[in-house]
Image (spheres, helix red, strand yellow):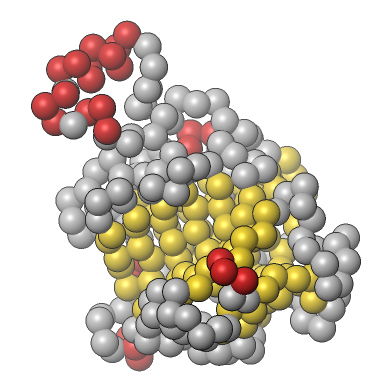
Amino acid sequence: MHRRNGWGWLFGCVLGVAMGCGDSGEPDTDNPGTGPGVSACGANGVLLCDDFEQASVGGAPDSATWQVQVFNQLGSISIDGTQAHSGSKSVHVVGTGQDSYRSVLFTTTKPFPPQNNSFYARVFMRSKSAMGEGHSTYFGAGAADDKRMVRIGFHQHVFETNLIQPDKEYELLSGPWGQPDQGVQLRAAEWHCVETFFNGADHELRVWFDGNEMTGLHATNWNANLSKWSPQYAKAWFGFETYHGEQDELWYDDIIIGTQRIGCGG
Ligand SMILES: [Ca+2]
């Protein structure tokens, strides 16, 4: 429990000023949040699901749920009718361009905040290209002010995750640095199921690829003795963001956000 209001917190913070308590950024896990969710889309505990079948080909994902953000117009996001995991439609993310830094994302705040600052996200994704050497993100979740976030993507040709804090960035790879054969790689031109548990209550992150946990991405202290590191989760996003000029096109489908592990059915 990490209550931000009330006399107990105030008293603790007065005592803790020397330790930087006023800027701890600890999430409020007492927030009742959204949940426990319903049975829908082939899963239990569902807070949001979108198969993108109701959207129009060539248009944007439903604006009642998703906000599209394309940095400097370097890329695009639109509903596609040629690739789909379910039905006939998915979200096509074009993450190609000349600049090194590019960000092409569709973001939801709809089911947030989740109960206990914790939620699962499940997505089916298909990448045109194999994972590159440079650091890039496929999806993530974080605080409303973007100062603290958890991102899942690739680095050194394998799945990786990283934690963004106001003053520092932490990273875990799914295999040893520079040895991609020992990490987990997403194969190009195939649909894959990626599940993530953003466990803000216990300051933990878990990620599964096609039903198998990527133990290298299981974050508890980020190998840095971090303890109270979770963002106050206020949004989740999907798409492509690169920090080293990687090129990719991706398709996303059957996104579910829920309070229980979702699995790869439905
Ligand atoms: Ca679909």
Q: Relative to the observer, which residue lies in front, 134 or 130?
A: 134
Q: Residue at the location (67% across, 73% down)? A: 76
16 above or below 235?
Answer: above
| Residue 157 relative to residue 126: left or right | left
222 above or below 252?
Answer: above
47 above or below 136?
Answer: above
Counting from the top left corner in percent of width and height, residue 203 is at 35, 44
Q: Residue at the location (41% across, 29% down)? A: 28
Q: Is residue 12 visible?
A: yes
Which residue in the rendered view is the most extreme toward the left?
A: 18
| Residue 262 relative to residue 230: left or right | right
| Residue 187 relative to residue 201: left or right | right
Counting from the top left corner in percent of width and height, residue 213 is at 44, 67
Q: Quadrant of the N terminus?
A: top left
Counting from the top left corner in percent of width and height, residue 130 is at 51, 89
Q: Relative to the observer, which residue lies in front, 112 or 246?
A: 246
Quarter of the view holding residue 133: bottom left
Counting from the top left corner in percent of width and height, residue 110 is at 67, 43
Q: Residue at the location (62% across, 33% down)? A: 34
173 above or below 35?
Answer: below
Quarter of the view holding residue 14: top left
Q: Relative to the observer, which residue lies in front, 186 or 16?
A: 16
Q: Is residue 125 visible?
A: no
Q: Residue at the location (27% across, 61% down)? A: 170
| Residue 222 relative to residue 92: left or right | left
Q: Quadrant of the C terminus?
A: bottom right
Q: Count all numbered tags in the image, as a single digit.
A: 0
Which residue in the rendered view is the most extreme toward the front?
A: 72
